[in-house]
């Protein structure tokens, strides 16, 4: 098919293609003539083109090897009702646009969304989405990605929801993902929802904004596995990301593997709650053995996770930097809320500043003091953050809890404004700088959520499907 332009595009402009279940499938240039599958649009799209996808459930084909393959420089947006003329008119939360690996239609789902990886049955796509050699201007925005089931041999055993292929010298996979939900994806290997493969001198550094990972499972990295081994790099830039109810043998939510390479993601406004690892790292596992793993966590909340070792974080030869964050009520074999269950330190070095870390107060004064393997950079505390509805780690994996702050939380106005220049909102899309205690000063709070006035818990859980 020739690369046609839509009627509202000027000569020489990029094309806009439409996808809708109600389209006649002829050319995709209008909603009436829309393609009926994103595959048709992806098959002809070029860099700079846009693909608008209306609500519905779309599968990538009939084979386990079929996948929606992103086009370098093309932008694909979901959340349309099927009659919009402007991109700003779409509503991705109302008009659920679902990319599903349930090619046989036999999974247990609700409105096309598999809520937990244990609900997958029969054959499913190994990777719902895949990409290779794509840059930051490759955009995926406004979709729910579900029911991928990575199996077989490598790399088909990793990245059930999304396989971001930056493997090998000269290869790069660094797309932009906005307003995405990964739900109920599975991998026999790594990264149930997303596998960022930067091995062997490759690069896989995707940009994620406003992304939820829930109900995903894998051997390692229940939701995401960042693979930067053997002279490669996988250091995603992640802002406003939530990990809830994911599970794995190691790294219940996120596994950063920088062994003989680099895996140093940046996480801002992150939430890790209700995740489980059978062995190590209920929420995060960081490995920098013979390589580099230096994650930077800013305004991150890690609570209600469990594992055999390191209910919150397992740090292995890594160097973490924790700022404006809350690590509270995580469970491992040493008990609930010990320093070991909060962060299990295996030859690692963790620098902490303006944060609340449970178990780090060895004096009983309520003030954070240094422990072996930790650097106290000041203004740290060890006090109950007073969440609105604490998450119980003994029940993980689960999405229960509300980890916003109550009005008398000791975490309010206790962060450092120097660390929040990159974002102006919190995980709840509220102001990131807000005078929560009405003292006339505006100082950022610790954790993913900024205390807003007024706020009362009404039984609504913000991290389940709207």
Image (cartoon, grey):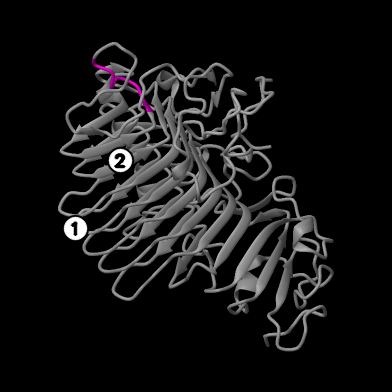
Q: Is residue 14 above or below residue 194?
A: below
Viewer-proximal residue among 318 and 58: 318
Q: Is residue 323 above or below residue 202?
A: above
Residue at image point 51% right, 35% down: 448
What is the C-alpha distance between the residues marked 1 and 2? 16 Å
Viewer-proximal residue among 24 and 243: 243
Q: Which residue is mark 2?
A: 285
Residue at image point 54% right, 69% down: 137
Q: Position of residue 132 (x, y in %)?
A: 43, 70
Count of numbered tags: 2
Q: Position of residue 402 (x, y in %)?
A: 56, 25
Q: Is residue 393 above or below residue 75?
A: above
Quadrant housing the N terminus: bottom right
The answer to whether 412 appears left or right of 288 in the picture is right
The secondary element bearing badge 1 is classed as loop
Residue at image point 62% right, 53% down: 143
Residue 357 belongs to the span the image colors magenta: yes
Q: Which segment is the magenta one?
A: 356-362
Q: Which residue is mark 1?
A: 260
Quadrant housing the C terminus: top right
Mark 1 surroundings within 10 Å by alpha-carbon count, few (fewer than 14), some (14 through 19), many (20 or more) = many
- N-terminal of the pair, mark 1 or mark 2, is 1
Q: Position of residue 321 (x, y in %)?
A: 32, 42
Mark 2 surroundings within 10 Å by alpha-carbon count, few (fewer than 14), some (14 through 19), many (20 or more) = many
Secondary structure that dominates the magenta span: loop
Look at the image and tell me whether residue 465 can be seen. Answer: yes
Residue 272 belongs to the span the image colors magenta: no
């Amino acid at each position: 098919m020739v690369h046609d332009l839509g009627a509202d595009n000027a000569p020489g402009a990029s094309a806009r293609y439409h996808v809708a279940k109600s389209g006649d499938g002829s050319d995709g240039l209008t909603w009436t003539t829309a393609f009926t599958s994103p595959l048709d649009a992806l098959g002809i799209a070029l860099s700079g083109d846009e693909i608008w996808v209306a609500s519905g459930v779309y599968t990538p084909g009939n084979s386990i090897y079929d996948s929606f393959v992103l086009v370098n420089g093309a932008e694909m947006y979901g959340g349309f009702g099927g009659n919009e003329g402007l991109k700003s008119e779409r509503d991705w939360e109302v008009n659920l646009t679902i990319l599903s690996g349930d090619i046989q239609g036999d999974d247990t789902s609700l409105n096309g969304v598999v809520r937990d990886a244990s609900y997958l049955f029969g054959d499913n796509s190994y990777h719902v989405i895949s990409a290779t050699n794509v840059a930051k201007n490759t955009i995926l925005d406004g979709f729910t990605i579900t029911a991928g089931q990575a199996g077989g041999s490598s790399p088909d055993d990793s990245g059930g929801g999304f396989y971001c292929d930056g493997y090998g010298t000269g290869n790069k996979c660094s797309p932009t993902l906005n307003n995405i939900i990964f739900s109920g994806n599975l991998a026999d290997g790594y990264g149930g929802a997303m596998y960022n493969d930067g091995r062997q001198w490759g690069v896989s550094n995707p940009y994620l904004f406003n992304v939820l990972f829930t109900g995903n499972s894998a051997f390692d990295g229940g939701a995401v596995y960042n693979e930067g081994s053997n002279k490669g790099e996988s250091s995603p830039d992640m802002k406003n990301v939530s990990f809830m109810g994911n599970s794995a043998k190691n790294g219940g939510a996120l596994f950063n593997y920088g062994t003989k390479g680099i895996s140093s993601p940046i996480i801002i406004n992150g939430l890790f709650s209700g995740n489980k690892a059978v062995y190590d790292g209920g929420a995060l596992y960081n490995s920098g053995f013979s390589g580099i793993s230096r994650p930077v966590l800013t305004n991150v909340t890690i609570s209600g996770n469990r594992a055999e070792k390191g209910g919150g974080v397992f740090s292995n030869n890594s160097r973490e930097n924790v700022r404006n964050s809350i690590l509270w009520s995580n469970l491992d074999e040493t008990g609930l809320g010990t320093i070991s269950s909060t962060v299990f330190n295996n030859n690692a070095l963790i620098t902490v500043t303006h944060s609340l870390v449970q178990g780090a107060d060895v004096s009983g004064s309520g003030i954070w003091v240094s422990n072996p393997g930790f650097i106290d950079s000041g203004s740290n505390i060890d006090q109950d953050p007073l969440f609105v509805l604490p998450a119980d780690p003994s029940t993980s994996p689960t999405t229960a809890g509300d980890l916003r702050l109550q009005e008398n939380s000791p975490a309010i106005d206790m962060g450092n404004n120097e660390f929040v220049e990159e974002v102006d909102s919190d995980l709840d899309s509220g102001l990131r700088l807000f005078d929560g205690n009405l003292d006339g000063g505006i100082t950022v709070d610790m954790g993913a959520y900024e205390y807003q006035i007024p706020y009362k818990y009404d039984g609504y859980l913000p991290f389940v499907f709207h």
